[in-house]
Amino acid sequence: MELLTKETFKEKIFDFENNTEWAYKGNLPAIIDFYADWCGPCKMVAPVLQELSDQYAGRVNIYKVNTDQEPDVSGAFGIQSIPSILFIPVNEKPQMSTGALPKKVFEEIIKDVLKVN
């Protein structure tokens, strides 16, 4: 699991400052957790994402964006409540989910949306 800054987000995920049309830069499906250190539900999601990061290593990249430290990134995606989770398939539009999801739901989304078994 990797913490993204505005610069690493633009480099690895999407350059939202120079592109209006979605164009994912990664070659593996990705999950991005928009969170804040003070957020209770975010703290519940963190260990689940760490488990998934280990479980799907080499098949799904999992990233975190601290909304307090990276307001430009969260603003570009209209993040208004956290945790907000962005699921990014390789060749399709990303999908956003809000709230703390249980591991089982993450696994279903990884299978159905990200097309990873």
Image (cartoon, rainbow, N blue to C red):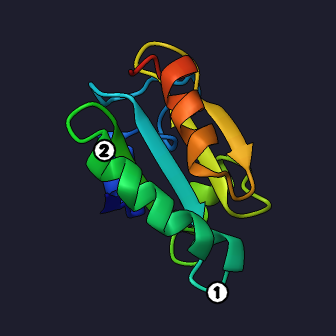
Q: Give the residue at x 69% y 59%.
A: 100
Give the residue number, with chain letter if any, for mark 1.
38
Instruction: Name the outermost residue toward the bottom.
Output: 38
Residue at the image position 39 percent from the left and 39 percent from the top? 13
Q: Is residue 94 left or right of residue 111?
A: right
Q: Nearer the viewer, mark 1 or mark 2?
A: 2
Identify the residue position indicated by label 2 in the image.
Answer: 55
Badge 2 local density, few (<14 within 10 Å), some, or many (20+)? few
Q: Residues within 10 Å of mark 1 (few under 14, many from 20)?
A: few
Q: Which amino acid lies under the numbered mark 2 shown in the image of this protein?
A: Gln
- Give 54 or 94, whichever is nearer the viewer: 54
Farthest residue to the left: give it: 58
Of the two numbered discs 1 and 2 on the same chain, state the one appearing first in sequence: 1
In percent of width and height, residue 74 lies at 62, 58
* Quarter holding residue 75: bottom right
- Cα separation, mark 1 vs mark 2, equals 27 Å
Q: Amino acid at mark 1?
A: Trp
Tell me the residue at 52%/35% (across/down): 107
- Where the N terminus falls, by quadrant? bottom left
Among the 4 quarters of the image, the one containing residue 64: bottom left
Q: Is residue 31 visible?
A: yes
To which quarter of the image does residue 87 belong? top right
Determine if residue 14 is in view.
Answer: no
